[in-house]
Amino acid sequence: MSAIIGCSPVGEEKKFVVGFSQCTEGDAWRKAMHEEMEREASFYPELRLQIKDAKNSSTAQVGHIREFMEQEVDLLIVSPNEAEPITPVVEEAFSKGIPVIVVDRKTSSSMYTAYVGANNYQIGKLAGEYVAKLLNGKGRIIEVWGLRGSSPAIERHNSFVDAIAAFPDIEIVAEVSGDWEKEVAKARFPAVYNQHADVDLIYAHNDVMALGAFESLPDKQAQQQLKFIGFDGLGGPNGGLQLVQDGILEATFLYPTGGEEIIQLAHDILHNRPFRKDNILNTTVIDERNVHIMKQQSDKILAQEKNIERQQQRLYEQIQLFNNQRTFSYILLASLVVSIVMGALALLSLRAKQEANKELLAKNNEVMQQRNEVARMARKADKATEAKLKFFTNVSHEFRTPLTLILGPVEDALQSPISADLKRDLQLVKKNAIRLLRLVNQLMDFSKVDSKKMKLQAAEGDLIAFVKDITASFERLALKRNITFKVKTPLKELAVYFDADKLDKILFNLLSNAFKFTSDGGCISVSLQISEDYENVSIAVEDNGKGMSPLHAAHAFDRFHTGEGSSNLGTGLGLALSKEFVKLHHGDISVVSEEWKGARFMVRLPLGRAHLTEDELLTDAGKNAIKLIPGVMDADQQLGNSDTAPAGEEAKLQEYTVLLIEDNKELREFLRIRLAKDFNVVEAANGTTGLQQAFEKVPDLVICDVMLPKQNGLEITSALKNDLRTSHIPVVLLTAKDTIAYKMEGIQSGADLYVTKPFSYIYLLERVKGLLKNRALLKEHYSSEISVETKTASPPKQLDKKFMNEVMVVVEKNLSNPDLNASSIAASLGMSKVQVYRKMKALLGYSLNDYVNKMRLKRARHLLLHSDRNISEIAYEVGFSSPAYFSTAFKNHFDMSPSDFKAARSTGEGTNISL
Ligand code: FRU
């Protein structure tokens, strides 16, 4: 069994392991020794005391010592069980250089470092002398031996024998081997005592064996008769002091344990301090004379030792606390250091960050400045672009009127009989004027695309028919130039949402290019095909003309890219614009070409309408508006192949008065001269005069420019259309603005036709004639109101209907009044006689008086058919001043006299006659 005694290490001092081989630790004496050692060792925290208990076995002790040697302890303490068996191993340890302290019992050699213990010979002798005195030189003794091989037993015996040798009457009569143990002595003593019951004294080598012998005595008497001597003189219960005090022992000889001294000595040796080899402890005899004081001192010492132990415990706790606190403070300190380091690092990184931030801020500012500068420049550029676009738009507008003025006379001249040379020249003029016009249109379209004003206005239509329509206008050219020109498609019709105006321009551009760059006798084809996934339709325009290099093909759709003059790219505007238009359709356009092998342009348009927003779809109103407004010229005309038939109008146009309101003097002049050939023309140079003229003259038709000083064309139109006097007059608006929005505005203001400049005069004339023809049909409508049946091409306008109703009411109300005439009716309508006259003429084709007359006859016819009144009565009732005048008028109108009509009624004839 082993135990370790020691304190927690403090500081960095070297640690020492001290091995203590104890022969036994089963008795009070050894326990006292250990307590002392521990107490003392607590003052030397660098010592670690390790105790092994041999339990009175020398063999075990030899083993323990060997273990300590193997363990390479720093110092060995040995209290040998027996001298002989232990000596060799102690010598071995000593020889190995391990410091060896022998305590209490000895070995048989002097090979050890130091010895601590009392002088057993001396103490034994002291006991002998004390006994001799006690027995007065005579007596019989039984000696109770400690372990016979152990040095104290031998020395205590020898010295005792030596001391009593001087007293021949003192005799050791018997011996008992007590082996230092109380129970052994107690067990063995009675047998010896029984044979020597007459003994006077028991000499025991220690107090506990003396007590064992005492307790083994049979009765109190024997106990009182016998004297007991022992060794050790321990304090505490059952200690030698107590036994002396209780009168059990006569005396005990103090045998100090030396625990304190052993540790001090070990400490000195380990720290290489000077020490004594033999440290002999003091002894003394304790008997009834000094036991009291010794006991008191011992108790006090014991109490103090307990106190010291308590204090040590407290100290230990304090040390623990201190250690804990120290550990804590170390941790705290370490944390503090870490915090400081971290703080410093954070500070450094903050500094670095601040620096970086500063730099960043400076850079940011720089970038911001640059951005502002860029934004400013962009704004400037925007403004410049805007101004440029405005300029382009204005210039383009400005170009249109002169172009009209060039094209008009040229067309006129081409209609007249002229020489072939002049015709060729004029056609060249026309062709180039048209080309110029196309460029102007393209520039205007670009400005709209750039200003995002260009919107898709798609409506569903038959793409096949549309493409065929466009290609048809190239057929004559193809024929003329011997070019094989075909439309290839497996489809009969295909409904596609497209913007007719834009797709027209796209295809026209592609076909114009193809014709331009294909030699006579070449091939051009247009193919239409649906993609395999039914998502798209493709329109491919292919030619075998001169084509273009891959580089040029890559830039074919770039704005203003014209190649090197030999390419298939035209002016550099058409294809770029086509691309913009295709993009508006959410489609794409591409080209594949090889120089001298031709080019294949492909337009791909998505099918269905899912890709279009509401905004990109044309309203119903818009669709109608478009139908009302045909293109300025068709492809034939544009390519200089116009062959327009002259206006073969059989109507007597001179009857009609046309009011021309136009501020541009040249255009007004141009139109006046031409219109005067067919109509009676009235002119006005501004809106206000024009409107006055309209009210005064009540013309049959008004041609009016939209952009006019004072009152514009739209205002004039709506003023005319909202006035009862003029609401029937058809209005034709002329303008350079050709956007849908403007057209819609014009139509909404009530205009009957919207013609975009530049226009073909022939086209304008045809449309004017058409409107007047419509007006004539309208007349028929109103006339037939009087008749039985009605037939009209276009419904009467609301205001005209109202006018006619009012006239009818006034006339019917006053029909029997023979004085009812144009003047009285005009007065009751709040209009002048001329205005009513003109309006009646325009709407019905005859005068108000004629109208009254017809109404009288209509009523008369009705009365003749449905009443039994006589002719005279009827004549007066319908407002004729005399029956004779009635009869004449009736006969003139119906070719039948009233009396004949009445007679025919009864036979069923004459009912079909009409007014
Ligand atoms: C204790 C003890 C003591 C005695 C000593 C001799 O073990 O027996 O009573 O004095 O040993 O070594």
Image (cartoon, rainbow, N blue to C red):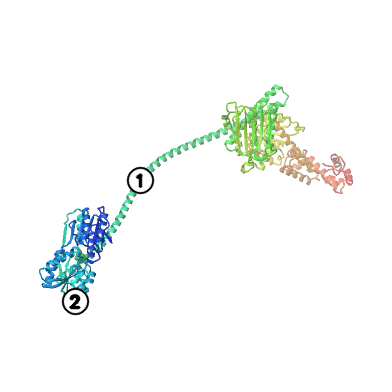
Of the 4 image quadrants, the one containing the C terminus is top right
How many numbered marks does the figure carry? 2
Identity, as a three-letter code, of the amino acid under mark 2: Ala
Of the 4 image quadrants, the one containing the N terminus is bottom left
The image quarter in which residue 116 lies: bottom left
Classify 10 Å Cα crowding around label 2: few (below 14), some (14-19), many (20 and above).
few
From the top left corner, tell me how far across and down residue 650 is, in percent: 77, 32
The image quarter in which residue 310 lies: bottom left
- Mark 2 and mark 1 in contact (Cβ < 8 Å)? no
Residue 790 visible? The answer is yes
From the top left corner, tell me how far across and down residue 217 is, in percent: 21, 75
The residue that label 1 is drawn on is: 345
In terms of secondary structure, where does tag 2 sit? helix
From the top left corner, tell me how far across and down residue 519 is, in percent: 65, 26
Chain-order first, disc 1 or disc 2: 2
The residue that label 2 is drawn on is: 222
- Compute the Cα span from label 1 to label 2: 92 Å
Closest to the observer: 331 or 561?
A: 331
In the picture provided, is 440 more to the left or to the right than 230? Answer: right
